[in-house]
Amino acid sequence: MEKKHKQLIGALAAFLLVILFLFLAVLMYYNWIPFPWFLFHPVIIALGFIAVLGSGLGYGYYKYQQDSTPGYDFRKKTEKQLTSKKAENLLEYYALNQYGVKVGEIHESGVDNVTDPTDSSEAIRLFKLVFEPKLLSETIGLYLSLEQEDIRIEDPRDPFELEQALEQVHNIRSVRSSKVDDFDEKMDEIRSSLGKSLAQKRTTVEYDDEGNVVREKSEPIRVALRRRQNQESSTEAEEQEVK
């Protein structure tokens, strides 16, 4: 369901609720129905207070659990690394959105580290999902880079959030056994190609006033993005401290 539809339904529900209260107020004003004095009984008031307090504490604990999730900062606009659970949910939604299939039996699901061909000390973190779709006799394999930019998923069960996140996701590869002769070989191929594409480097050159090269630095694009995100996070933290 799109966000504007949710807002429209919420506004309509609020309008109908106001109309209902006004209607009941008119009925009570003309004594067509008795005023619910029992609602002002001390026991009812105490139970209502406990219910509101419990709801507030429950919501606060839920947000605390979210903020404590490793690899994701729910107070920031971006996340540096997708967690395995969110990556799996995102790929399941991708399969539904791209192929119109729901995930049935899962054969493989988890992080798959690929060695950077340009720097063996730097691992490229991918997420692998291999499954059989419901009502279909085939196998689908998906690879997703866990290093994403501008992704926010607070509730991985919310289709709207998954749809919004999917629009921002880069570096997904997929294989369907019905489309290839050797499924495992094709999976190895897309794993290798995705690792190489993520290992692409960006070169930064600094010049002096006379146009001479002072420093030339090459680094993987994903590392540059991660550093920029860290700098943005540090800047936001400093601004909050100043405030």
Image (cartoon, helix red, strand yellow):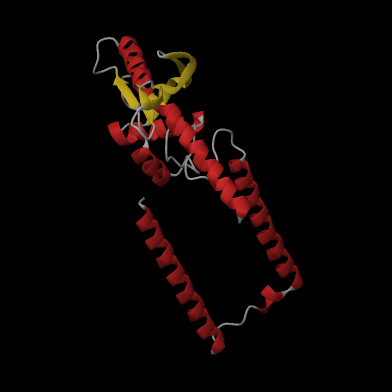
Q: Position of residue 18 (x, y in %)?
A: 48, 74
Q: Quadrant of the C terminus?
A: bottom right
Q: Which residue lies furthest to the front in this view?
A: 210
Q: In this view, does 189 lie above or below 225?
A: above
User: Quarter-wise, where is residue 87 in the image?
Assistant: top left
Quadrant position of residue 68: top right
Q: In this view, does 180 lie to the left or right of 68?
A: left
Q: Residue at x 25, y 14 (%)?
A: 180
Question: Residue 238: image x %, image y %?
Answer: 59, 47
Nearer to the camera, 33 or 140: 140
Q: Is residue 211 above or below residue 49?
A: above
In the displayed structure, does residue 99 sit left or right of residue 80? left
- Which residue reaches farthest bottom? 30
Q: Where is residue 78 in the image (x, y as percent from the top left)?
A: 47, 41
Q: Residue at x 33, y 27 (%)?
A: 135
Query: Is residue 187 positioned above or below 169 on the image?
Result: above
> Which residue corresponds to the image point at 45% horizontal and 27% vertical from the top-left?
223
Which residue in the rendered view is the most extreme toward the right?
Answer: 42
The quadrant holding residue 141 is top left
Residue 126, compared with residue 233, is above or below; it is above
Residue under the image location 38 percent in, 44 percent down: 164
- Visible residue check, residue 184: yes
Report whether residue 133 is seen: no
Q: How many marks?
A: 0
- Please name whichever residue, 130 or 132, is drawn nearer the observer in this view of the structure: 130
Residue 36 placement (x, y as % from top left): 63, 78
